[in-house]
Amino acid sequence: MKLARAVQDLAPSGIRRFFDVVSRMDDVISLGVGEPDFGTAWRVREAAIYGLERGRTSYTGNAGLLELRQAIAAALGRRYGLEYDPEEQVLVTVGVSEALDLALRALLDPGDEVIVPEPCYVAYPPCVTLAGGVPVPLPTRAEQGFVPTPEEVERLITPRTRAILLNYPNNPTGGAPTREQLLALAEVARRRDLVVISDEIYDRLSYDRPHVSVPTLPGMAERTLLLNGFSKTYGMTGWRVGYAAGPADLVAAMTKIHQYTALCAGRSAQEAAIEALRVPDRDVEAMVDDYDARRRLIVAGLNRIGLPCHLPAGAFYAFPSVAATGLSAQEFAERLLHEGRVAVVPGDAFGAGGAGHVRCAYATGLDQIEEALGRMERFVVGLPTMEGARIGTTVAS
Ligand SMILES: Cc1ncc(COP(=O)(O)O)c(C=O)c1O
C-alpha cells in the first residue's frame, strides 16, 4: 500500500527495536524503559473503580472534566504560584504525548522550525516532522550538564524558527538547569519571540534543588506552553492522562484539533487523576527519597566501574559515558545485553550529543540496581581497553 512520505521517511524508534530483543531474552535486568516501578496508589485506582461502579463511562467535555482542570490549576498555583484559568487555559490530554502533538500542530505552518536541544525524549523530532515542521537539533554536552547556552540557541534561530522545546528535568540525561541558566534561555526566547514548549513531566523528581517551572520566569507565562501529566509522578503510565496549560489562544487552538481527534481523555483516567492530585505531598516526597537513594547508588557504582557519570539533578535516568571502553554506545549496549544480561539504551537513540553514552533508568529496586552494577562491572573489567581505567570518582553537576 502506498503510505504517506512523511511516515515512510520516519526512522523506527531505536528504543523499541532494542526492547523487542530484550523481551525475548531470559534473566535480563532492565535499566531500559522509563517506567516507574511504583504502581498507581490504591486510593487512585479506587477512584476510577468507584466511577465505573456508578456507571460513569461516557465521554467527558473535550477539554476534560472541569473538576480535573480546576484541580490542575490549583496544584500549579500551590506549587509554583502560577495562575491559569481552568476554563480557558487548561486542556486535559491523552498523556503529555498528545499534548505535545497538539501543540506542534497548533503552532506550526509547513517548514516552520523548532529548536530541539538533544539528547532528548525520542518522540520530539518525529512529532515536529509529523506536524509539518522541521526539527533543528541543538547538541548539548555533559560538561555543561546537558543544558544549552543562550549563544548556542541564538545561533540556530532563523526567520522560520517558531519554538524551542525544553524538557527539564531531562530524559535521557537527568540534567536540569539552574535558575540562572534558565533565565538566560528565557531571555533569548523573549527577545527573539519564540514560543517555549516546556515538558515538565519530571518536575516532582527534582533532587538537589527545587524545580524551576519555565512559565514562572519573568515575561514567560504568555509565551510558554507547560506540559505535564500523571505518568511519572503517580505511576500512571497506562492510564494515559496529561495536560497542557498556557495562553488561552494556543490552548483553544489545541482544543479544536483535540475535539476532532482524541475527543477527550478517558473518563476513568480523568477521575483517577483528580484523586492523584489529592495524594499528600509527603507520599510523593517519600517516593522521591527512594529514587534519590537509587540515584546515588547507581551513579557511585557507574563511576567506580569506570563509566564517568554526572549526578543527575532530576528524573530517573543516569547517563554515563562509555567512551573509555572503546566501544560505541550501540556496541556497548548490545554486548552488555548479550554478555552481561543488563539492558541499557544507547545514547544515540536520543539524538545528537547522546553518542558515547548509555541511558540507565533507575526506576527499579536497589537490589536490582546492585545486581546490575555487579554484572556491568564484570562485563567492563573483561574489556581489554578498560585495564587501569577505573577512576573511582563521582563527577557532580
Ligand atoms: C520527557 C517525556 N515526555 C513525555 C513522555 C510521555 O508522557 P505521557 O505518558 O504523559 O504521554 C515521556 C515518557 O517517557 C517523557 O520521558
Image (tube, rainbow, N blue to C red):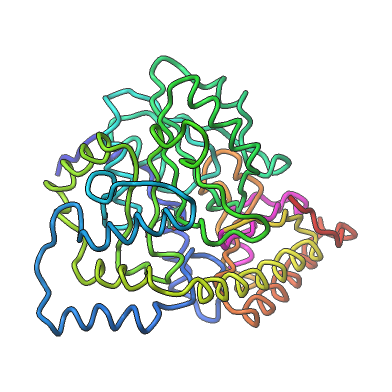
Quarter holding residue 187: top right
Residue at point 40%, 59% (across, down): 75
State the residue in front, 88 or 371: 88
In the displayed structure, would residue 289 be above or below residue 5? below
Q: Provide residue 198's location: percent of width, then percent of height.
A: 44, 43
In the displayed structure, would residue 138 be above or below residue 317? above
Q: Provide residue 72's location: percent of width, then percent of height.
A: 34, 58
Q: Provide residue 190's location: percent of width, then percent of height.
A: 48, 25
Residues in magenta, as a range: 315-337
Residue at point 79%, 65% (across, down): 305
Within the displayed image, which quadrant is ligand 1 positioned in?
bottom left
From the viewer's perspective, is 24 left or right of 50? right
As for residue 335 lying within the magenta part, the answer is yes
State the residue in front, 326 or 173: 173
User: Among all residues in the image, which is located at the extreme top?
Assistant: 159
Q: Quadrant of the N terminus?
A: top left
From the viewer's perspective, is 135 left or right of 382? left
As for residue 142 lying within the magenta part, the answer is no
In the displayed structure, would residue 240 be above or below residue 46? above
State the residue in front, 391 or 28: 391
Q: Provide residue 92's location: percent of width, then percent of height.
A: 26, 55
In the displayed structure, would residue 38 be above or below residue 132? below
User: Among all residues in the image, which is located at the extreme right?
Assistant: 388
Q: How many discs appear?
A: 0
